[in-house]
Amino acid sequence: MPSAGLGAPILNAPSGKPAATGSPPQQIPSAIDTRRSESYYETKGTIFGALIEAIDLGQLAKLDADSAREEIRDIVNEIIAIKNIVMSISEQEDLLDDICNDVLGYGPLEPLLARDEIADIMVNGSGTVYIEVAGKIQKTGIRFRDNQQLLNICQRIVSQVGRRVDESSPICDARLPDGSRVNAIVPPLAIDGPALTIRKFRKEKLTLEQLVKYGSISPEGADILKVIGRCRVNTLVSGSTGSGKTTLLNCLTRYIDHDERIVTCEDAAELQLQQPHVVRLETRPPNLEGEGQVTMRDLVRNCLRMRPERIIVGEVRGQEAFDLLQAMNTGHDGSMGTVHANSPREALSRLESMIMMGGYSLPSRTIREMICGSIDVIVHGSRLRDGSRRITHITEIVGMEGDVIVTQDLFLYEILGEDANGNIIGKHKSTGIGRPRFWDRARYYGEDQRLAAALDASEMTDSRERMRV
């Protein structure tokens, strides 16, 4: 018998049959391993079932994570010895890690969550798991025991933030302790079993300097973004799904002064602001009786009473667009938000549509005037066909001509072609606008010299390239 510090977790007689028929398979962190045999999973299921019979989960829950893991390892080793299971040392270590993750963590997802290069994890039922690495989607060899085991892991994840996902509430947005974004949708809406999507957060927080290093923006473009973040320019970050909107929003907020009061509003809290004076707000779904829901609009309207200097909305997707524009236009300069769109012009159209769908009986021209008077700059990012992410537009709103909002691009990304490996070749370039409309604001904050240098340097680079051609 293992010597347990618990007293309660003990191993039953080996003659008893296991209570469970299997356990979710696990992957080693260094690779997406598809070589594990059916016999490995059968053996693991047998051992897992015996472990569930032998251990007192209530007592195990009282231990810290390291002690609980050691307790499980001791009992599993004892089960292997009693049942005379023949395994190599490496297989036994893999199996021990697998079972510990199943009992204490997120099962097969644990090693994927530990790999920082993975951007997204997509689980399509118990037998199919995809990941995104370097902008490319790959199928893994990971699988779960069955859909019930996957549903249990979904429930474990969302319960940590006080939410639930089940037949009566089959859709849920949540987050992991590290800030990773989670969406779960389960039967009866998900026909082939629970679907779990995790947008992972990098342990290392990306900065504009790193985006320059990765080619997402040029050094001159990064300087312009620093000025925008510092000088309280009302900014809308737009882009398609997976284009890096939240990452870019995090980068912009790094340049907010530390003496400013910031209030963030999100569906699932994932922004990672570094300032000391930040209040984080998060929406809440309705309870079982359909009551108690707190929407994004409720949060935005409430934060106006919290004396914020800046309001940051994680994603604008509904009626809260009207309230955010009102806030931007009534003294909360430097507020920011993101919106799904395929271009800066489309982002403006989506804002207008959101306001109109909110039930406001306002003429289109009035709405556009409100947008024009509230938003100063749109920063647009795109995910290109080779999987790379680029900041393709820095666009400012100039004013109105008739019923049309007039914009001008300060910075653009031009696609020149692709190399032999299918990677996009392109360059960031200035459009030659000498003085953007927020020039006076930059001068007020002492950033006009940096802004002028960034625009001049970019224009000089473009001129040299044209001369070479």
Image (cartoon, rainbow, N blue to C red):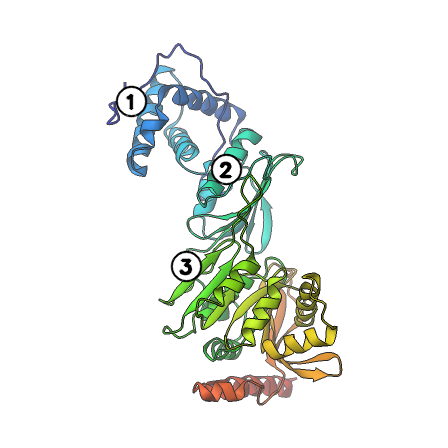
The percent position of residue 399, horizontal first and vertical second, equals: 66, 83
The amino acid marked with disc number 1 is Ala
Q: Where's the N terminus, which quadrant?
A: top left
Q: Quadrant of residue 371?
A: bottom right
Label 2 to label 3, Cα distance in Å?
Answer: 28 Å
The amino acid marked with disc number 3 is Glu
Compared with residue 383, is residue 288 higher up or lower down, i.e. above or below?
A: above
Circles 3, 1 touching at the beta carbon (< 8 Å): no
Which residue occupies the foreground of this view, 29 or 272?
272
Q: What is the number of the mark on residue 8?
A: 1
Label 1 to label 2, Cα distance in Å?
Answer: 26 Å
Q: Residue at x 31, y 20 (%)?
A: 10
Compared with residue 206, is residue 255 higher up or lower down, i.e. above or below?
A: below
Residue 446 in sight in this render: yes
Q: Quadrant of residue 207?
A: bottom left
Q: Earlier in the sequence, mark 2 or mark 3?
A: 2
Q: What is the number of the mark on residue 155?
A: 2
Q: Earlier in the sequence, mark 3 or mark 1?
A: 1
The percent position of residue 77, horizontal first and vertical second, equals: 33, 24
The percent position of residue 164, horizontal first and vertical second, equals: 52, 40
Query: Could you tell whether 235 is left or right of 307 in the image?
Result: right
Residue 274 in sight in this render: no
Residue indicated by mark 3: 204
Which residue occupies the foreground of this view, 163 or 9?
163
Q: Where's the C terminus, which quadrant?
A: bottom right
- Dot 2, crowdedness within 10 Å: few (<14), some or many (≥20)? some
Q: Residue at x 62, y 60 (%)?
A: 317
